[in-house]
Amino acid sequence: MPEYKFIPKTETKIQKPKQSYGGWITVFSLTVFIIFGSASGGVYFYEWYLKKQISSYNDTLQKLKSRIEIASISEIINRAEDIKTAKKILEEHSVPSAIFGIIEKNTVKNNFFTSFSFRGAQNGTAAGKQKSESGSPGAAFKGEAKSYEDLAKQMKSFKESDDFSGASFSDFKLLENGDVSYGLNLTFKNDLLKF
């Protein structure tokens, strides 16, 4: 009878199945999970930081509000209005005293003035001033020169000056002492008399 053995003569190797952890899909999923988890944590901590900053700024604002009185704010607003009004007045204010230096600079030797009358610009006049017909400020003078030659030099000086927009002479008279009297009407440039 044949002999049967249940044990094989040679050992057969049984291969163990490979253990799989999901491969590249698992690695990708795990990476995405870690990135989103980190981002969520970062957003949470950033929100906490912003709330803390807002709270700090609110506290600082409350402290500053308590220091500023309503009366002082009202006073600041009133002062701002006063400054605005003063600026407007200064922009429109004319300074007739500025013309004396200009007249002195343009007056030549052997000429002098015996009377002076200032006239304001067209937009208004101050008390004691005449209103200008041309719309520009000006002045009327009565003057005397030692000779006609001195008068001619004076006429040339005023007419060639850049300080005036017009100069007209009139009423020439020869006086007993040999001097010549005349009338002078000067028109000043508008921006010359601004303060």
Image (spheres, rainbow, N blue to C red):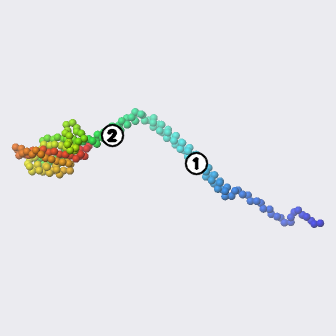
What residue is rendered at 73% in x and 58% in y?
19
- Per the image, the residue denoted by label 1 is 42
Q: Residue furthest right?
A: 1
Side (left or right) of 20 relative to 95: right
SS under mark 2: helix
- Per the image, the residue denoted by label 2 is 84
Q: Residue furthest top?
A: 71
SS under mark 1: helix
Above or below residue 191? Residue 17 is below
Amino acid type of the residue tagged 2 in the rendering: Lys
Side (left or right) of 67 relative to 169: right
Quarter location, residue 128: top left
Distance between mark 2 and mark 1 Cα atoms: 52 Å
Q: Nearer the viewer, mark 2 or mark 1?
A: 2
Q: Nearer the viewer, residue 194 or 122?
A: 122
Marks 2 and 1 in Cβ contact (< 8 Å): no
> Residue 119 location in percent, x, y?
19, 41
> Residue 132 location in percent, x, y?
20, 42
> Residue 112 location in percent, x, y?
12, 45
Crowding at mark 2 (Cα within 10 Å: few <14, some 14-19, many 20+) = few
Amino acid type of the residue tagged 1 in the rendering: Gly
What residue is rendered at 20% in x and 40% in y?
131
Q: Which of the image's four quarters has the C terminus?
A: top left
Whichever of labels 2 and 1 marks the residue nearer the N terminus, that label is 1
What residue is rendered at 17% in x and 40% in y?
117
Q: Which mark is residue 3?
A: none
Side (left or right) of 16 relative to 92: right
Is any part of residue 19 visible from this angle? yes
What residue is rendered at 9% in x and 51% in y?
149
Crowding at mark 1 (Cα within 10 Å: few <14, some 14-19, many 20+) = few
